[in-house]
Amino acid sequence: MVWRPYVSFNIWSQFESAVGQEHWHCDMKRGFVRARKKEPSVKALLEQDTTAQHIGLLAQRGVWEFHQDIELLQIVDGVERVVDKLKLSQESAEIQQRVIQILKNYYEKPILLGKDIIKLSRGDEGIPEPLLIQQGNYFLNLFAAIDCIFREQDGTLHILDFKTGKSDFDRRQALVYLLAANYLFPQQKAVASFYNLENRKSSELITAKNAQLNAIRDQLVRIAQEHQKELRLYKQNPGEFAQLFPPNPGYQCYNCQFNSICKFSVSEMSA
Ligand code: SF4
């Protein structure tokens, strides 16, 4: 396979925080995730499935199970059956409690029931196939792991992203999905939205005109180029990690997965 520069919403969010979250942003986190991911201590931290990520994956899998066998949404013990399929008894008490509540929520309000589902991810498919994006002579791979696509009655494609926990909806993620949909289903009208399986809140419907999608594409190209440049510079000058990826110590260190190995961590400094 031909190697190409690559980008994803994840990478974008590691470069720039969502509006209003800028004070929490730390470039050094991106350095650990992207430039030092193969170092054993960093790799070990990256491999730890955090509780939040794990709940997100189990929730997605739960929705998938309900739609593999729609009867599960109609029988009295449908939730219990999905609990068994997910082997929740092997999980921690917190994970069990939150995922069971998510399954109950979905059983009571199955928002995809009756929809013309085109794609519903199981949640454990791994890295998606990249989409080839072109800007002039520049080509890059866009990775966009879409949870669900269904067709509205008027034919519009609806891209739905499931959330769990307290994470805010980030409009940029929806725009990346709309750009991906534009490549996957050219000429088709598309909207995107988020749905939180825990608090049952939906976002507004997000749409984008062609000019906006072109702007998003250009933004992603800029980030992919910047990303490759950073990786190259780090490889040439590993001693300049902190200059290339400046730390931003503060309250955010307490929730940072690298605080045990980061010498700039606030908790590390106050220890
Ligand atoms: S511990 Fe703090 S300074 Fe270090 S990478 Fe995490 S957020 Fe940044």
Image: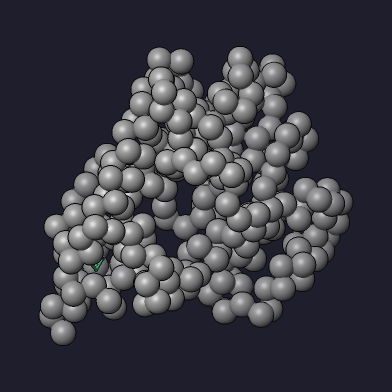
Q: Position of residue 159 (x, y in %)?
A: 59, 33
Q: Position of residue 168 (x, y in %)?
A: 40, 47
Q: Residue at x 32, y 38 (%)?
A: 225
Residue situated furthest bottom in the rendering: 271
Rendering quarter of residue 263: bottom left
Residue 217 visible at all:
no
Quarter of the figure with the N terminus = top right
Q: Residue at x 72, y 52 (%)?
A: 64
Residue 117 visible at all:
yes
Q: Answer with left or right where residue 117 lies relative to residue 145.
A: right
Closest to the observer, 147 or 95: 147
Closest to the observer, 31 or 153: 31
Q: Position of residue 188 (x, y in %)?
A: 62, 18
Closest to the observer, 173 or 238: 238
Quarter of the figure with the C terminus = bottom left
Quarter of the image where ligand 1 sits: bottom left
Question: As displayed, is residue 188 above or below residue 165?
Answer: above
| Chosen colour scheme | one colour
Q: Residue at x 77, y 48 (%)?
A: 67
Question: As displayed, is residue 192 above or below residue 264?
Answer: above
Q: Residue at x 56, y 71 (%)?
A: 95
